[in-house]
Image: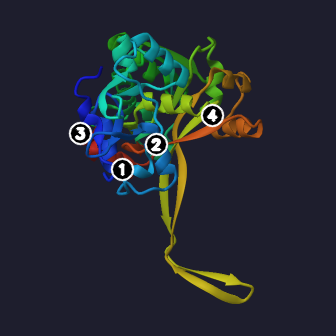
Amino acid sequence: MTANWEKALISPDAQIFDAIRIIDEAAAQICLVVDNQNKLLGTITDGDIRRGILRRLELSEPVSKIMNKEPKVTDCGTGAEEILAIMTKLQIHQIPVVDEVGVVVGLDTVDELVRLNRNHANWVVLMAGGDGERLRPLTEDLPKPLIPVGRKPVLETILENFISQGFSHFYISVNYKSDMIKAHFGNGDRWGVEIQYLQEDERLGTAGALSLIRDIPTAPLLVMNGDLLTRVNFQSMLEYHLEQSSSATMAVREYDFQIPFGVVNIDGSSITSIDEKPTHRFFVNAGIYVLEPRVLENLASGMYKDMTDLFQILIDDQQQTSVFPVREYWLDIGRHDDLDRANLEFDENFQ
């Protein structure tokens, strides 16, 4: 049973923001919503929060709006093997333990029951083949992934972030000034991981480079652009992908665009209303993906294809595709002002 499980307790009137803080800080990665007698009312996982974001809920709204009101529970008499079987069948990682009247008395997690190590079987592909046109003249002598942000190249921060979350098998797709990238990262021995390279003789796009992978992955593949700084929890993204039973999952960011004029709505030649400087909200591609191994069958070796093209193929084929809303720190280092911002914010987010 998880130690300090009481830290996961939360009131139904608490804000979604409070649930985010508990999930981010607690090892159990769950909130247990209880009344003033600690009777279980529901549970909140990272996936519940992200689904709430997709519904456009504000973080100030009560957690009762996103909680699972019918969570699976066990009692104190349930054995570890039975609990693990339940978790495996339902693809969940935590189960609250309650007494005969529904009062929470503990919390069981997969990690504690089987003492899993943190090494993931999932391969990670980092896309680092771009020529960094928008960052010239900096990229005339240095490939964009090796541009320093803070105290180290941006791709090194990305790599170490994945390693800190338990990933150890990496592919790096390279093209522009590839020798410099290979010389810096080598085979990964410096970090105690394995690094292989996907050498693009010509630009293959963000999905086409995956066709150069010769081995067949046995678990979902994580793919990420090599010019992003983010604190996304990749394990949470993998779990979300599995929950949705998706062929492919795309991380997305909310993007607000304010029209700087009054928008006139009309019916024929008549004005029906006027919206003064309205704001439109969209979800945009955040450059991080999870792909089932079978998805790679849609890629012809050496043929150019962007990731958006690959998703469209899956959508047209009526395969399940999902979006994973990013709520953590995220910044695309594609322009000079983005690079300046990254250097200002680095220490705050990547200590």
Can the viewer see residue 258 in this picture?
yes
Element at badge 2?
loop
- The residue pinned by badge 1 equals 16
Q: As drawn, is 146 to the left or to the right of 6?
A: right
Q: Which mark is residue 205?
A: 4
Q: CA distance from mark 2 to mark 3?
A: 40 Å
Residue 230's image quarter? top left
Q: Which mark is residue 347?
A: 3
Q: Measuring 54% from the left and 52% from the top, which residue is drawn there? A: 283
Q: Amino acid at mark 1?
A: Ile
- The residue pinned by badge 2 equals 69
Q: CA distance from mark 1 to mark 4?
A: 38 Å
Which circle, 4 or 3, is nearer the viewer? 3
Q: CA distance from mark 3 to mark 1?
A: 27 Å
Q: CA distance from mark 2 to mark 1?
A: 15 Å
Q: Residue furthest front?
A: 100
| Chain-order first, disc 3 or disc 1 | 1
| Chain-order first, disc 4 or disc 3 | 4
Q: Are marks 2 and 3 in contact (CB under 8 Å)?
A: no
Q: Amino acid at mark 3?
A: Asp
| Chain-order first, disc 2 or disc 1 | 1
Which circle, 3 or 1, is nearer the viewer? 1
Element at badge 3?
helix
Q: Residues within 10 Å of mark 1 (few under 14, many from 20)?
A: many
Which circle, 2 or 3, is nearer the viewer? 2
Q: As drawn, is 216 to the left or to the right of 61?
A: right
